[in-house]
Image: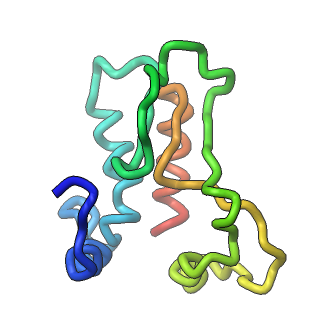
Amino acid sequence: RVGSTSAEEQSRGRHQCASRYPDLRLAWARFALFRDWLLECAECRGNVLVCDARDVFFQANPFARPLGAPLLLFAEHWEQTTAHWMMGTVKPCTGFDLKRPRRPMLCSGSTMGSREALLGYLALMHEELQ
């Protein structure tokens, strides 16, 4: 069902693990999986877009123009800052101080760049989330 996920399905998804990375929740293992798939793809030599299906709405070909930088990270809506409730799921793993002033939050679900830059980013994300 596109665009519709019950609370039960969402909860189940938060606790599922990928067979290659059984110690990581699927939401975090995706970075390692994306990296693995990109490494296994011999013909994938150009720019790459990694995104959550519900995070994007294409109005044009994202690769029609040069990217302007090797790696592009995208910010969440301006109201979704580091004070967002979602940061509570990150803090136990990172020690992020929730009392710090609100800061813009980057969207880990949407990243774009060269193959090499994406491979580096995905490896770093996997390392941080282990």
Q: Which residue lies most toward the top here?
A: 65
Type of colouring: rainbow
Q: Residue at x 77, y 66 (%)?
A: 103
Quarter of the image that includes the N terminus: bottom left
Above or below 116: residue 54: below
Nearer to us in this view, 102 or 16: 102
Residue 117 x %, y %: 56, 33
Q: Residue at coordinates 52% horizontally, 29% vertically from top-left?
A: 116
Left or right, residue 78 beside residue 46: right
Task: Specify whether 77 is left or right of 18.
Answer: right
Expressed as whole percent of the image width and height from the top left, the position of residue 63 reads 48, 19
Instruction: Please name the residue shown 18% across and 63% down the image.
Output: 19
Q: In this view, does 38 lie to the left or right of 62?
A: left
Is residue 47 or residue 84 the one in the foreground?
84
**Quarter-of-image position of residue 36:** top left
Estimate the x, y position of residue 47 in percent, counting from the top left: 47, 23
Residue pictured at 78% horizontal, 86% vertical? 99
